[in-house]
Image (cartoon, grey):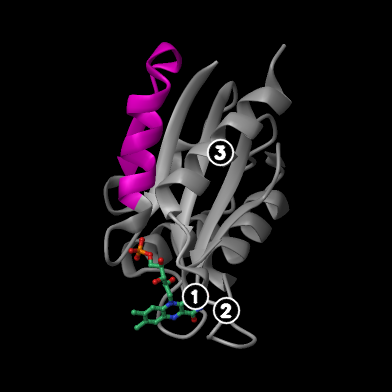
Amino acid sequence: MRTIALYGTESGRAEAIAETIARTFPDRDVEVVNMADAETGIFRPGILYLIVCATHGGGELPGFAQFLHDDLADLSPDLTGVTYAVFGLGDTGYVGKYNRGSHQFDELLTGLGATRVGPFGEHDESTHEDHVALGTQWVQAVFDATAP
Ligand SMILES: Cc1cc2nc3c(=O)[nH]c(=O)nc-3n(C[C@H](O)[C@H](O)[C@H](O)COP(=O)(O)O)c2cc1C
């Protein structure tokens, strides 16, 4: 299945995860796309989207991810048949706003008819865990869950 790693970042961690996914799973031929360069038409049936997205600004999406989110919300395309998985980056120090960005994206895509697959991955910066290692484990679990 064609796979696109679509990342939303401010300070580069989400990008590092998306790039590592592409390098770690060469057989999947993962295309890496920055949400800053994506338009709403990127979402098409028959493609698996790996959404890797940070939270910034106190519970908000990174700037360019916010634009993509808002364009989708405005245009409200029917995303039936679109499959996606989500990995959120955040910090539990932001009480009540932890990982809200990735959850906002998830709620929007589901609301437009897309289907989330595999586990909802997350990285909490306060744990000092390796975000790239966690992201790679998450993708493996997503691929396992979606294997034919
Ligand atoms: C100014 C600022 C605001 C942040 N706000 C939140 C927040 O509201 N909720 C949260 O879970 N994490 C928040 N974070 C933590 C980031 O999501 C976390 O550092 C993440 O790993 C950054 O990923 P990125 O490098 O891909 O942008 C914030 C970080 C910064 C620097």
Figure quadrant of residue 31: top left
Q: Which residue is mark 1?
A: 126
Residue drawn at point x = 56 percent, y = 38 percent: 137
> Does the closest atom of ligand 1 sit within 8 Å of the Cβ of label 2?
yes
Earlier residue among tags 2 and 1: 2
Q: Position of residue 52 (x, y in %)?
A: 47, 50
Position of the N terminus, as image quadrant, is top right
Q: Is residue 142 left or right of residue 91?
A: right
Element marked by disc 3: helix
Q: Is residue 39 visible?
A: no
- C-alpha span from label 2 to label 1: 7 Å
Say if 136 sits above or below 148 in the image. below
Figure quadrant of residue 146: top right
**Figure quarter occupied by ligand 1:** bottom left
Q: Which residues are magenta?
A: 15-34
Q: What kind of residue is marked 3?
A: Gln
Verify whether residue 29 appears in magenta: yes
Q: Which SS does the magenta portion mostly show?
A: helix
Figure quadrant of residue 63: bottom left
Instruction: Mark 2 and mark 3 in contact? Answer it, CB < 8 Å.
Output: no
Q: What kind of residue is marked 2?
A: Thr
Query: 78 or 33, which is in the foreground?
Result: 33
Q: Which residue is mark 3?
A: 137
Earlier residue among tags 2 and 3: 2
Q: Position of residue 125 (x, y in %)?
A: 46, 70
Residue drawn at point x = 41 percent, y = 43 percent: 6
Element marked by disc 2: loop
Q: Which residue is mark 2?
A: 92
Say if 76 sits above or below 79 in the image. below
Position of the C terminus, as image quadrant, is top right
Q: Is residue 90 left or right of residue 17?
A: right
Number of callouts: 3
